[in-house]
């Protein structure tokens, strides 16, 4: 019962006795990947995503005002600290923001943009960017571009930016990732950068990796074939995104098998990658 769930969630996040960190955890719903693993067979990632978004929307339609109150009540004005009190307040505030954005709250996208623009620390700025990207707001693409210009000279921050690009739930994500890897400035031989981008796409963007037209599967298989020539460990790791291919519904299952078979038939793979591939196809 969504109404009962919303009531319980509202009571939890407005409680005077519960810790903000605990409240923040209650705002995180099971991921699409976890739902898929729970279903186990004939998985349709698009249907899972749509159903999850419907639930988020139903919750936000009942809790928008409460979530906005919690968001405003947990502003941290003191100098940045990693202490428990501040960390808990930031987690709760950013959790409320993420739910407002992903649940289609009227003010969610605006709040994410405002927080991104005015944040005084990387934690809050990145949280605002992540909310905008996972909700794919009208500002998401511009914010990703701004973040890249401002921060990605730091390799660790570059990894975070790559992950967000990889998990963007938008139809042009494959083209976006291809453009990133085709950019002369992208470190194509750096294992951490490659894992952050393609590993995140294959594992953490199920609706786009397992697109019904098979383009996500083919994109990853082509990446594996290319990178295996230079870094077999990265190629083998990214290939494991296919480990659940038999759990998809028939159409996607056929597309995944076709991509894997084409990768095998092309030949030239390293021993480790070829072994993983054969095991996947053998079941």
Image: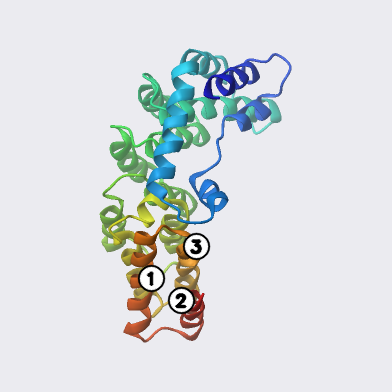
* Residue 153 visible, this angle: no
Q: CA distance from mark 2 to mark 1?
A: 7 Å
- At 68% across and 29% down in the image, what residue appears? 22
* Image x and y of residue 138, in percent: 28, 32
- At 42% across and 26% down in the image, what residue appears? 57
* Image x and y of residue 20, in percent: 66, 24
Q: Residues within 10 Å of mark 3 (few under 14, many from 20)?
A: some
Report the front residue among 25 and 113.
25
Q: Which residue is mark 2?
A: 281
Report the front residue among 78 and 191.
191
* Image x and y of residue 167, in percent: 41, 48
Residue 274 higher or lower than 104, as above or below: below
Report the front residue among 110 and 276.
276
Disc on the earlier residue, 2 or 3:
3
Disc on the earlier residue, 1 or 3:
3
Label 1: which secondary element: helix
> Quarter-wise, where is residue 117 in the image?
top left
Label 3: which secondary element: helix
Residue 109 higher or lower than 174, as above or below: above
Disc on the earlier residue, 2 or 1:
1
Q: Which residue is mark 1?
A: 257
Q: CA distance from mark 1 to mark 3?
A: 11 Å
Residue 244: mark: 3
- At 32% across and 83% down in the image, what residue appears? 266
Quadrant in which the N terminus is drawn: top right
> Quarter-wise, where is residue 14 in the image?
top right
Q: CA distance from mark 2 to mark 3?
A: 11 Å
* Residue 189 left/right relative to 173: right
Report the front residue among 194 and 135.
135
Residue 56: mark: none
């Amino acid at each position: 019962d969504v109404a009962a769930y919303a009531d319980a969630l509202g009571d939890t996040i407005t409680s005077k006795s519960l810790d903000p960190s605990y409240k923040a955890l209650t705002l995180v719903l099971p991921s699409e990947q976890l739902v898929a693993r729970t279903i186990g067979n004939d998985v349709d990632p698009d249907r899972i995503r749509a159903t999850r978004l419907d639930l988020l929307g139903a919750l936000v339609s009942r809790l928008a005002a409460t979530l906005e109150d919690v968001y405003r009540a947990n502003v941290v004005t003191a100098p940045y600290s990693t202490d428990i009190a501040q960390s808990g307040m930031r987690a709760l505030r950013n959790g409320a923001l993420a739910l407002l954005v992903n649940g289609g709250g009227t003010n969610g996208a605006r709040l994410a943009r405002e927080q991104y623009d005015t944040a005084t620390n990387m934690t809050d700025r990145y949280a605002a960017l992540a909310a905008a990207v996972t909700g794919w707001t009208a500002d998401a693409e511009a914010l990703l571009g701004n973040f890249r210009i401002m921060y990605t000279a730091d390799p660790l921050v570059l990894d975070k930016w790559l992950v967000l690009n990889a998990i963007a739930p938008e139809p042009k994500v494959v083209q976006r990732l291809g453009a990133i890897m085709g950019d002369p400035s992208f470190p194509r031989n750096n294992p951490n950068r490659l894992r952050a981008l393609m590993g995140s796409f294959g594992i953490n963007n199920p609706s786009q990796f397992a697109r019904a037209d098979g383009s996500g599967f083919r994109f990853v298989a082509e990446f594996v074939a290319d990178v295996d020539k230079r870094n077999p460990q990265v190629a083998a790791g990214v290939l494991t995104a296919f480990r659940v291919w038999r759990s998809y519904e028939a159409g996607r299952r056929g597309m995944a098998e076709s991509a894997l078979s084409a990768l095998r038939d092309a030949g030239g793979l390293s021993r480790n990658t070829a072994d993983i591939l054969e095991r996947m196809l053998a079941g």
